[in-house]
Image (cartoon, rainbow, N blue to C red):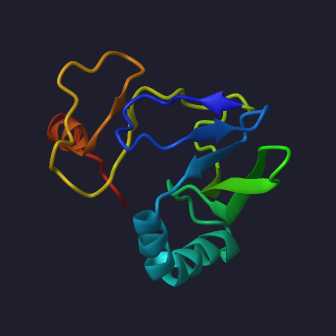
Amino acid sequence: KKWNPTGGRSGSAWLKTADERFVLKEISKREIAHFLKAAHQYFSFITTTMDSSPPIPSCLAKILGLFKVTTTLKRGSKSGSAGGVSQVLLLTENLLYNGEVRQHPLTRIFDLKGSSRNRFVKEAKAGDVQLDDNFHAYLQQYPLYLT
């Protein structure tokens, strides 16, 4: 089902499965190139976290596949000429899936890109997706202690 998450500026199409467990995101040629550059390191890291005993928790969504979907449309019944639309879709788990009762409810959601350029939501309300600079400001008040 079509989904319009808040905070995104790319204009990419987003879809969720009916049970909301998985997310499809349309990605651009530039994003494909970045993904392919980092894919080996990403999958090595994810494999390490999942194969550890016990598994190491990670906030990274697991990427399950990259698909190119082409829809062919026939135009003009007499000429039979065809045109098509292609999309590249990235399939991931939905980190916000709430199929099980959460031990700790979500209080904030951050969309982190590793950049601070135009990455601040000025008047974030409860439930709004916040960005990198919001996360940095939050950490100033509430540091994360890692052991």
The image shows residue 137, relative to residue 52, as above or below, that is above
Q: How many marks?
A: 0
Res. 58 visible in picture: yes
**Residue drawn where x is 52% and y is 59% of the image:** 58
* Residue 11: percent from left, percent from top: 42, 40
Residue extending furthest toward the front: 78
* Residue 138: percent from left, percent from top: 22, 36
- In this rendering, would 119 be left or right of 84? left
**Residue drawn where x is 15% and y is 49% of the image:** 117
Residue situated in front as seen by the camera: 47 or 92 = 92
**Residue drawn where x is 58% and y is 65% of the image:** 56
The answer to which image quadrant residue 101 occupies is top right
- In this rendering, would 19 be left or right of 111? right
The quadrant of the image that shows the C terminus is: bottom left
- In this rendering, would 9 be left or right of 78? left
Res. 102 visible in picture: no
The answer to which image quadrant residue 37 occupies is bottom left
Residue situated in front as seen by the camera: 5 or 10 = 10
The answer to which image quadrant residue 3 occupies is top right
The quadrant of the image that shows the N terminus is: top right
- In this rendering, would 11 be left or right of 88? left
Residue situated in front as seen by the camera: 113 or 104 = 113
Residue situated in front as seen by the camera: 132 or 58 = 132
* Residue 17: percent from left, percent from top: 75, 38
The image shows residue 43, relative to residue 23, as above or below, that is below
The image shows residue 25, relative to residue 8, as above or below, that is below
